[in-house]
Amino acid sequence: MEIKITVNGKTITDHIDADLLLIDFLRAHGCYSVKRGCETSNCGLCTVLMDGKPILSCSLLAARGAGHRIQTLEGLQQEAADFVGFIADQGADQCGFCNPGFVMNTIALLRENPDPTDDEIRAYLAGNLCRCSGYEGQLRGIRAYLNSRKREGKL
């Protein structure tokens, strides 16, 4: 079947098998930040934004993405650059495997709620599996980023 999906601002037309997952479609088109982790929709490593909302690309057929706008970390580098340094400063990127999922969900969170509480951050990021850091480093990094934005008058 032929599908047309806009990925990071570029429209891609491709012939696919009906059972192709969105994660495999994206990786086949150079979006290597989208990672396969648990294969059960529980780890968040495959998170992408579809029409601005976070989804798990391992749980969606590529055909269901047809006609939608998909963003991966490759297409959000500038937006992500604002806060990833704050997360790294807290030692929250030890192995780095979970970072793309955390970054994608943090971008979605901050677009939806530019000044979340710690509990709101925890709730939004709860679907991301991190085996290294225990999540507190990510929380401290996001909080430090938000505090710096407040000091700069950007919130």
Image (cartoon, rainbow, N blue to C red):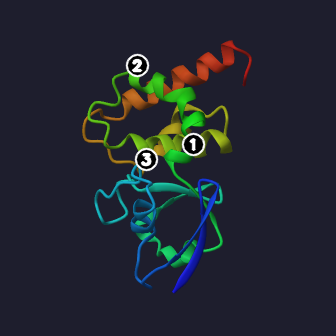
> Three-letter amino acid code at disc 1?
Leu
In this orientation, which residue lies closer to the viewer: 67 or 127?
67
**Number of labelled discs?**
3
Q: Which numbered disc, 2 or 3, marks the residue that appears first in the sequence?
A: 2
Image height check: is 34 above or below 150? Answer: below
Q: Secondary structure at mark 3?
A: helix
Rendered residue at 38%/29% (across/down): 136
Horizontal arrangement in the rendering, residue 54 relative to residue 88 (left or right) = right
User: Which one is in front in this view, the residue at disc 1 or the one at disc 2?
Assistant: 1
The disc labelled 3 sits on which kind of residue? Gly
Q: Type of residue at label 2? A: Asp
**Of residues 139 and 97, which is closer to you in this image?**
97
Residue 67: percent from left, percent from top: 65, 72
Where 114 falls versus 98 (above or below)?
Answer: above
Q: Are marks 1 and 3 in contact (CB under 8 Å)?
A: no
* Label 3 crowd bin: few (<14), some (14–19), many (20+), radius 10 Å: many
- What distance separates the C-alpha of mark 1 from that of mark 2? 20 Å
Say the numbered circle drawn on residue 136.
none
From what the image shows, is residue 83 above or below residue 39? Answer: above
- Residue 107 lies, with reference to residue 149, above or below; the image says below
Q: Within 10 Å of the Cα at label 2, are there few (<14), some (14-19), or many (20+) other Cα atoms? A: some
Q: Quadrant of residue 90?
A: top left
* Residue 11 place in picture, x, y as percent: 63, 64
Alpha carbons under labels 2 and 3: distance apart: 18 Å
Point 39% across, 24% down: residue: 88
Q: Earlier in the sequence, mark 1 or mark 2?
A: 1
Q: Which residue is mark 2?
A: 89
For image coordinates 64% across by 67% down, the residue present is 68
Secondary structure found at label 1: loop
Tell me the residue that label 3 is attached to. 101
The numbered disc on residue 76 is 1
